[in-house]
């Protein structure tokens, strides 16, 4: 019988290989998630994200192989392949808000969602209810306003989420490199709009109807408009996604309109409504054609926020 004995050098090489393959962030890790300090015992292997914008955050961190799937619009996630080809490999688990049974049946070991982004206060699926089932949750920072946090939104919300996800999944260096690139793009926009004498007023047009759906003081579009050298006409309205009267829109008569293109008929339906309504059709922005159409994933928190920032800055200050 022959016996193979490992040399000291062979053992050292094996040890170094093991260390290099280990996650960059040692677990357990603890991060702030809304009003909680949440601890994650191990990197997720069967994560689920809610909606296309949160799914794109995980794709931007190259985590498709660690996902059981996503919950939300199949069409929007399919459209993500233009930036993230691996989106095509993801499985839709459910279109609407999940039940606990749905997540358990899918073998989920991590849920990335937010308040009004896959969870409701007092609802069936929350960090508390899932935690009791052994499924840890990370909450989207922008959504924390829904449970009482009134922090002013900036692009740091996006960066915070990406860096926290990097720690949770053990890909911290990857997250830091991604955020560094985003910060460079934001700084380039800031340099272009520095010293503008006038900050154009902007109406974020989310939904039509009896009242206007828009983005309030704590929504990501407000942060994007401000970073692009403008001012949201609803920046004095509490909350993130909210409603104001059409009379208020008419009274404030914005310099420009950004239309959130989603839902049946999208931007075309919303603009047709505005042009058919007395008072609205006389807004200076509509008469001058000062309208920019952006997608759902550009205006909700996610990697496309940097694309939206660059587009809004060009739209408002293209002459610079």
Image (tube, rainbow, N blue to C red):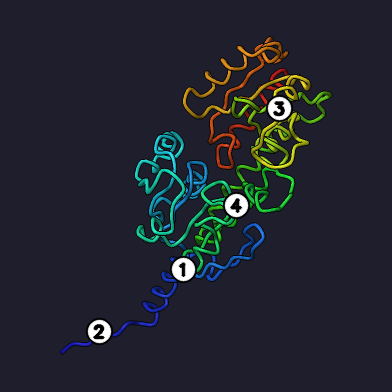
The residue indicated by pointer 4 is 161
Q: For numbered disc 4, what is the local secondary structure?
A: helix
Q: Are marks 3 and 1 in contact (CB under 8 Å)?
A: no
Query: Dot 4 surroundings within 10 Å: few (below 14), some, or many (20 or more)?
Result: many
Q: Disc count in the image?
A: 4
The image shows residue 262 at horizontal and vertical percentages of: 51, 29
Query: Dot 1 surroundings within 10 Å: few (below 14), some, or many (20 or more)?
Result: few
Nearest to the eye among marks 4 and 1: give it: 1
Question: Which callout, 2 or 4, points at the residue further toward the start of the chain?
Answer: 2
The residue indicated by pointer 3 is 245
CA gap, disc 3 and disc 1: 44 Å
Q: Residue at x 43, y 62 (%)?
A: 109
Q: Are marks 2 and 4 in contact (CB under 8 Å)?
A: no
Query: Dot 3 surroundings within 10 Å: few (below 14), some, or many (20 or more)?
Result: few
Q: Residue at x 54, y 57 (%)?
A: 166
Question: Which callout, 1 or 2, points at the residue further toward the start of the chain?
Answer: 2
Nearest to the eye among marks 4 and 3: give it: 3
Q: If the image is split into quadrants, where does the N terminus sit?
A: bottom left
Q: Residue at x 55, y 57 (%)?
A: 138
Q: If the image is split into quadrants, where does the C terminus sit?
A: top right
Nearest to the eye among marks 3 and 1: give it: 3
The residue indicated by pointer 1 is 134
The residue indicated by pointer 2 is 4
CA gap, disc 1 and disc 2: 43 Å
């Amino acid at each position: 019988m022959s016996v193979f004995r490992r040399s000291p050098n062979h053992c050292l090489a094996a040890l170094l290989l093991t260390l290099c393959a280990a996650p960059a962030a040692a677990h357990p890790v603890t991060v702030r998630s809304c009003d909680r300090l949440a601890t994650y015992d191990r990197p997720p292997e069967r994560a689920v994200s809610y909606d296309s914008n949160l799914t794109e955050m995980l794709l931007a961190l190259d985590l498709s192989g660690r996902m059981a799937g996503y919950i939300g619009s199949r069409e929007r996630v399919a459209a993500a392949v233009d930036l993230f080809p691996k989106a095509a490999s993801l499985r839709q688990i459910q279109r609407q808000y999940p039940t606990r049974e749905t997540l358990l049946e899918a073998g989920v070991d991590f849920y990335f969602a937010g308040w009004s982004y896959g969870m409701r206060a007092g609802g069936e699926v929350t960090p508390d209810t899932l935690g009791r089932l052994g499924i840890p949750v990370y909450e989207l920072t922008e959504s924390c306003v829904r449970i009482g946090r009134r922090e002013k939104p900036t692009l740091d919300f996006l960066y915070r989420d990406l860096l926290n996800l990097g720690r949770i999944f053990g890909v911290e260096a990857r997250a830091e490199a991604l955020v560094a690139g985003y910060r460079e793009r934001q700084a380039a926009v800031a340099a272009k709009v520095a010293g503008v004498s006038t900050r154009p007023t902007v109406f974020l047009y989310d939904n039509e109807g009896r009242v206007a759906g828009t983005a309030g003081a704590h929504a990501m579009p407000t942060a994007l408009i401000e970073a692009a050298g403008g001012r949201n006409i609803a920046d004095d309205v509490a909350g993130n996604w909210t409603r104001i009267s059409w009379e208020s829109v008419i009274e404030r008569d914005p310099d420009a309109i950004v239309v959130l293109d989603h839902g049946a008929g999208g931007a075309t339906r919303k603009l047709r409504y505005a042009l058919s309504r007395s008072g609205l059709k006389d807004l200076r922005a509509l008469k001058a054609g000062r309208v920019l159409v952006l997608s759902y994933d550009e205006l909700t928190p996610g990697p496309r926020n940097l694309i939206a920032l660059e587009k809004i800055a060009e739209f408002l200050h293209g002459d610079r």
